[in-house]
Image (cartoon, grey):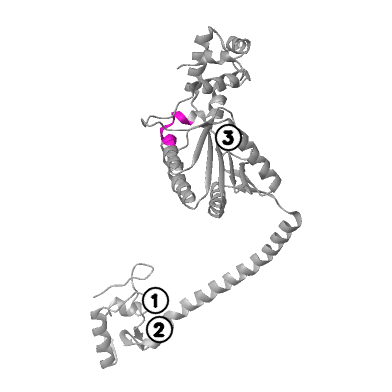
Amino acid sequence: MCSIPDNSGKPRQGEASTAPLHTGVCPEGLAFYEAALTAGSAQGEAPACLTALGLMMPAPDAADTLVPVPPEVATAALAHPVERAIIEQQQALSSMRTVMAQVESVYRSTRRDTSVALQRLNGPAVISAALEEAAQSCKREVLTAQPGGGRPAEILEEALPRALEARDRGVDQRTLYQHTVRAHGPTLDYIKRVTQAGVEVRTIDEVFERLIIYDRSLAFIPDSQGARHTSAVMIRDTAVVRYLASVLDHAWERAEPVTYRSDHQRPELLTEATRLNVLRLMVDGYTDAAIATRLGMSSRTVAAHIKKASDLLGSNSRAQLAYLTARAGLLDPSSAGSRAVEGA
């Protein structure tokens, strides 16, 4: 005999169930049903497929006797709870749309009256959705500033197809990193792939915040009051976006292109510029951990840069190193003495 369980795991004799649409009648069930129709009733236990579909029911005056149920009657019994559920869902959907229509009216009216140019985005999913929409709508240019050193490999894997797809659409792309990415393998591999496709990449020794600008009309910046990577601000104000783009343009002019030589070796590390930036932040009073966070490197690397500079300048303490650095004018861009910290 065939077996088609209900929600409890077992069919109940003589009771129709809301069987799934793909339920069929097994050969034993068809034979049992035909015999019951011929005899007018049947004795014993009916195949589970018949009871699941409500095609056999106990006789009103004899519980041990089964009588066949016409298919149209069984169909009506099965369809009734399904139809009722559909009606309830349609009513719930209609009610939802009515409520949201009222809220939408208030939302649009408020945005129009206040001319909202700034919108806070909370949560990684919301931020990602907004960025994805902006990227797909971008027609001409994407400007990006990515601080913090090397980026996680999984993020780069997600970013690569988007960058290549945008380039295929003719969107110009310029990305600015800090010098420290030149020592990060996964980021360098990503840079090599995108630059081969025509994306421009440069690095700079300065500290900056994350910034993405689409078509010089829409910008995204971190929300400094929110948790890192979980809160951002979307900016549509033309003047503000134009200003942010000009700041990035000026930084771009000071940055160094990331280029691969014909021998396929990695780009120049620019160790000197990185070490000067470490010293600059140290003189400003930052701890090794704070410097590491701002420059996208490990605290061990920061300590190594400071030790190298201390050895070269003959310093015995952090305070003395700050004094000797200032006296030698190492942090003066016009000073040739900055070469004193070169080498690694």
Name the residue type under label 1.
Ser
Q: Position of residue 63 (x, y in %)?
A: 34, 84
- Placement of the C terminus among the 4 image quadrants: top left
Q: Separation of disc 3 and disc 1 at Cα?
A: 70 Å
Is the residue 211 above or below the residue 4 in the image? above
Is the residue 21 above or below the residue 319 in the image? below
Name the residue type under label 3.
Trp
Residue sticking out furthest to the front: 262
- What residue would you read off at disc 2? 75
- Placement of the N terminus among the 4 image quadrants: bottom left
Mark 1 and mark 2 lie on one chain; the one further toward the N terminus is: 1
> What residue do we see at 53% from left, 15% from top?
339
- What residue would you read off at disc 3? 252
Residue 326 location, quadrant:
top right
- What residue would you read off at disc 1? 17
SS label for mark 3: helix
Disc 1 to disc 2: CB gap under 8 Å: no
Q: Separation of disc 1 and disc 2 at Cα?
A: 11 Å
- Would residue 229 be visible to someone looking at this image? no
Name the residue type under label 2.
Thr
Q: Position of residue 233 (x, y in %)?
A: 63, 45
- Which stretch did the figure color magenta? 181-188
Q: Separation of disc 3 and disc 2 at Cα?
A: 72 Å
Q: Position of residue 143 (x, y in %)?
A: 57, 42
Label 1: few (<14), some (14–19) or many (≥20) C-alpha neighbours in 10 Å: some
